[in-house]
Image (cartoon, coloured by chain):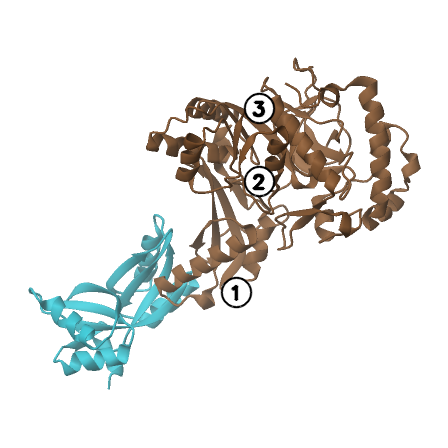
């Protein structure tokens, strides 16, 4: 099923012509942003130098760090009165990355979500329970408006209260859910405990954190559904940038809206189709916050085979990160955020180790820190109070519940040069 | 007056993993320090080892040099009747006086059972126990 067959299946010269004209528009649009006027000048390029799609290689990259330094509105290319919505992502130093949308941006975003959900077989006859956080996180509202665009009956259930979520699925005859894959498994477990069979469910879309083919099998069997992978990021509107079709073999990225490249993350050189590297995206129709060659940090490759569904070139399911960003229960975490928080607490040292596990299908993060000797009173109760304080401060920064444990001073590894403070033990799921 | 009954307990931070207590005990043995009583309080992943030793200052120095995190805590040691009601005697004296016992551990002293108590108001605790006819051990008895 197609939502917009013409755009979804466009290829060859037609697509290239459309991409080129939109790229030229984007390159002009970013001239409203001081950062781009400066970096274009430094790179010795001007908008008129973009005559072919390959000319994009002349343009400088944009990184997440650049966006952070533009806080709050440094990357907006339109006057603020044209910005009708703001979302944010967590930042590494307490400051989030702010993303803005014009009315047309929201319209485009909803269109892309509508394409994705139609592609996996959902129609206006479906009842869609959206179990992603509503608010500044793009997951909740992004899917919400896309599902409404199709005309589905949308239940904005947001996250939490698993039993209530299950009751709603049963009482409202929900046919499709959208959540993180970890939460999907949690839902399956609780449903089994409750003896709820979730008979009406048939489709689920999962995103915001990596998940394996084994996990897909488990989700599909236990929930009695077809499970599809969803990919996106706030900088590109949010979810909906790329999505699986019923083939469940790679994700279709919407080439009319996103110009995708795969580069070697070390050298920045563009890699040929089929080779694995970092995904770099230039959005082609973003108005409020156009970006040039945004380095997503996500590792993937272009799949070279044509898809039987007739849509364009796919990317492989995401397999890792080019930087040290962690995705914990769908939330982006940079280890430097933890460091920054610890520095503000005199009672603990600034050395730390982070361990990530998947316990009962939910990501759990444990942070080991050293106590400052001067603050050790000998009382266990005081240590426990301190433990709560540190966990509370980290929760405030990361918006994430973590376990904090104390180790003896001087026992954490000291790193010179490249640090290895994060031990991700979730690898077994692959 | 109450001072001689204040006993210096050493409190040592320890991760909850195999070999930590052995490391502490070995260090004290090497320094010729005798452990008279001790207990372990455990939280999530770590704990505090509490010990009464015959040479608290030397123990502090030895352990700190080895990198352990150590501090002193004032406790009192009450001689306890080693028969039914022995614990009640002491607990009720303090309870009636509104003094809270934060933690305690017992050990069998040379001349009968001894209860080590960490209370919220140490000096008042000492006075109340003595006033009620209880017997406290002095710091010199742990040397």
Q: Secondary structure at mark 2?
A: helix
Tell me where residue A180 appears, x and y as whole percent.
52, 35
Horizontal side, residue A216 vs residue A16: left or right: left
**Which is more N-terminal, label 1 or label 3?**
3
Horizontal side, residue A191 vs residue B111: left or right: right
Q: Chain letter of disc 2?
A: A
Instruction: Give the chain letter for cyan.
Output: B
Q: Is residue B111 visible?
A: no
Q: Which label sits on residue A122?
A: 3
Q: Which label sits on residue A108?
A: none
Q: Nearer the viewer, mark 1 or mark 2?
A: 2
Q: Secondary structure at mark 3?
A: loop
Q: Is A146 rendered above or below residue A364?
A: above
Q: From mark 1 to mark 2, how far is it between C-alphas?
A: 37 Å
Q: Chain letter of disc 1?
A: A
> Which residue does the image show at 77% across and 47% down from the upper left?
A82
**Which is more N-terminal, label 3 or label 2?**
3
Q: Is residue A162 visible?
A: yes
Q: From mark 3 to mark 1, how far is it between C-alphas?
A: 53 Å
Instruction: Give the chain letter for brown.
Output: A
Labels 2 and 3 in the same subunit:
yes
């Amino acid at each position: 099923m197609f939502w917009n067959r013409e755009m979804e299946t466009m290829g060859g010269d037609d697509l290239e012509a459309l991409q080129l004209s939109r790229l030229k528009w984007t390159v002009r649009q970013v001239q409203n942003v001081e950062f781009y006027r400066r970096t274009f000048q430094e790179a010795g390029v001007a908008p008129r130098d973009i005559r072919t799609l390959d000319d994009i290689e002349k343009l400088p990259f944009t990184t997440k760090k650049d966006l952070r330094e533009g806080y709050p509105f440094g990357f907006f290319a339109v006057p603020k009165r044209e910005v009708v919505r703001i979302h944010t992502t967590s930042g590494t130093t307490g400051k989030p990355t702010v993303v803005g949308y014009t009315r047309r941006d929201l319209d485009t975003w909803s269109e892309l979500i509508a394409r994705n959900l139609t592609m996996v077989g959902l129609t206006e006859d479906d009842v869609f329970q959206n179990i992603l956080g509503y608010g500044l996180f793009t997951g909740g509202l992004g899917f919400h408006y896309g599902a409404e665009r199709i005309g589905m009956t949308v239940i904005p259930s947001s996250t939490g209260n698993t039993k209530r979520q299950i009751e709603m699925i049963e009482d409202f005859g929900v046919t499709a859910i959208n959540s993180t894959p970890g939460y999907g498994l949690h839902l399956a477990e609780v449903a089994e405990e409750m003896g709820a069979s979730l008979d009406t469910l048939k489709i689920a879309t999962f995103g915001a954190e990596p998940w394996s083919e084994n996990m897909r099998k488990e989700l599909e069997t236990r929930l009695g559904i077809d499970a599809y992978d969803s990919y996106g990021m706030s900088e590109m509107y949010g979810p909906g940038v790329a999505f699986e079709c019923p083939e469940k073999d790679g994700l279709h990225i919407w080439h009319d809206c996103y110009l995708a490249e795969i580069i070697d993350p070390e050298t920045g050189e563009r890699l040929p189709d089929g080779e694995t590297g970092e995904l770099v995206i230039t959005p082609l129709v973003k108005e409020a916050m156009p970006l040039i060659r945004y380095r997503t940090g996500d590792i993937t490759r272009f799949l070279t085979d044509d898809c039987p569904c007739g849509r364009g070139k796919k990317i492989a399911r995401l397999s890792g990160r080019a930087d040290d960003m962690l995705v914990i229960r769908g939330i982006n975490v940079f280890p430097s955020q933890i460091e920054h928080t610890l520095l503000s607490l005199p009672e603990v040292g600034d050395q730390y180790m982070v361990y990530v596990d998947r316990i009962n299908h939910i990501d759990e993060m444990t942070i080991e820190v050293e106590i400052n000797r001067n603050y050790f009173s000998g009382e266990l109760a005081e240590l426990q109070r301190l433990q709560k304080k540190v966990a509370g401060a980290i929760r405030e920064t990361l918006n994430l519940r973590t376990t904090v444990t104390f180790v003896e001073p001087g026992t954490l590894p000291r790193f010179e040069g490249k640090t290895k403070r994060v031990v991700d033990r979730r690898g077994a799921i692959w | 007056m109450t001072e001689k009954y204040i006993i210096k307990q050493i409190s040592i931070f320890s991760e909850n993993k195999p070999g930590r207590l052995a490391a502490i005990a070995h260090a004290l043995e090497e320094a010729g320090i005798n452990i008279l009583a001790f207990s372990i309080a455990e939280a999530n992943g770590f704990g505090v080892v509490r010990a009464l030793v015959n040479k608290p200052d030397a123990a502090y120095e030895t352990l700190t040099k080895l990198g352990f995190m150590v501090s002193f805590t004032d406790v009192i040691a009450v001689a306890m009747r080693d028969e039914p009601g022995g614990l009640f005697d002491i607990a009720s004296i303090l309870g009636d006086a509104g003094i809270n016992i934060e933690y305690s551990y017992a050990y069998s002293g040379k001349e009968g059972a001894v209860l080590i108590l960490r209370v919220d108001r140490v000096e008042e605790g000492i006075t109340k126990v003595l006033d009620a006819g209880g017997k406290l051990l002095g710091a010199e008895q742990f040397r």
